[in-house]
Amino acid sequence: MQEPPCAQPPALRFGAGEWSGACGDLGTLLPYLVAYLVVLKLEPAGVLCGFGLALVATGLLFRSPLPVQPMKAIGALALAQGATAGAIGAAGLLTGLVWLLLGASGWARRLARAVTAPVVDGLVLGLAFSLLWQAGGLMQHQPLVGVLALAVLSPTLFARRAGTLWRGLSVAALPVLLLASIGWALWCQPSAWQGGLALQPAWAPPALDWPALLSGDLLWAGLLLALPQLPLTAGNALLAVRAEHQRLFPDRPISETSLALSTGAINTLGSAIGAVPMCHGVGGLAAQVHFGARTGGAPVILGLLLLCAGLAWADAATALLGLLPPAVLGATLVLAAGSLARGVLERGARGSHTGLMLTVAVLSVWHAAAGLLVGLLLQRWWRARPGA
């Protein structure tokens, strides 16, 4: 199969919609940043600069609001196992090398061609349900805050069919909500200024920290962290994100090969400075577009902010992350989930394949890799039936 034709890339924009969209993926990004920086106590400069560089490169290369997110399976397993910084870095290096190989060899494209549309739609729908589940967990201890946050963000639900005033409110809703949340937290916790936010900027670039290939972390990281992540990345950050991107931006096609090579490059190079494993998740794409992003300006904006934080305010940024109410982040995930589900519905029912799509969706709520593998088996069985 040939790669999709190259279209003229759009110019980057940095208007209000791109700034709002840049905040759209924080519901997924910030909880993992808190876990890596506060719980596992990784070096903040390397983690923040890793995301920053990856986001800037992604925005400049793809010219679309493709996100850069933490790899969820590796993050969850690292927290459960209390992984060391060396093990996490080794997992990123191994994952990066695998995806570079898959992209360069053409196997990423072959995998994508082998998966039918109902399976991809099932993955997207399952990830929407998964985001709702995560949102519920973030909002359960502050339900009133979550409801208020959803009310503030409600203009974004009608922005596509509303007038200029309503569209303006939708663009401003998320940045205003985040700033107000931080301001309220500082008002309630004035001691936070002394806890790190008042530190003067200090230039402190991340140290080169490529994990040694002969270290004891490598085998552990490969078997327990990197290997379980591979099918999840294939489903969420390759198949589903490409399908959703083509739906949203049919004029600027991207290929599975470019996504695989990008994933490989940001992880291989990121592991050299202490970054955590990263990928391009479909939930982040839906969230950024929902809140106004239309070009690569949104990831560039967020990337530059994270780079500045990592280079000059790493400790202050770590303290700031702990101030955002989890329920506010949960509200952003609710809207991202709605955008994903709406995309599946807009593509229409799959007729006799609806059962396959729903089966994949239900399994993907538990684990996207399980949904993908079962979907592949079911579609093979479906094709092999007499009269199929």
Image: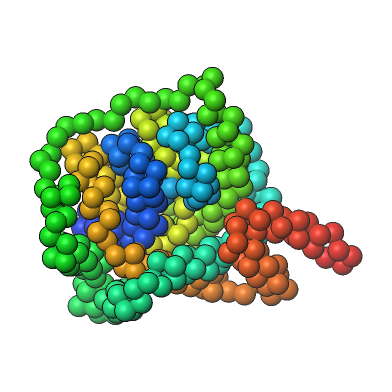
The answer to whether residue 106 is seen in the rendering is: no
The foreground one among 347 and 223 is 223
Colouring rule applied to residues = rainbow
Q: Is residue 280 visible?
A: yes
x then y, percent, for residue 296: 32, 50
Q: Quadrant of residue 218?
A: top right
- Above or below, 209 against 379 in this view is above
Image location of residue 294, percent across then percent down: 33, 58
Q: In front here: 156 or 212? A: 212
The quadrant in which the C terminus is found is bottom right
Vertical placement of 183 versus 315: above or below?
Answer: below
Identity of the residue drawn at 23% across and 41% down = 314
Residue 303 on image: x %, y %: 29, 45
As drawn, is 350 to the left or to the right of 151? right
Q: Quadrant of the N terminus?
A: top right
Q: Residue at x 44, y 43 (%)?
A: 278
Q: Quadrant of residue 20?
A: bottom left
Q: Is residue 306 above or below residue 161?
A: above
Residue at image coords 68%, 72%: 354
Tell whether 200 sits left or right of 18: left
Spot occupied by residue 53 in the image (x, y as percentages of width and height) = 32, 38
Q: Residue at x 28, y 36 (%)?
A: 45
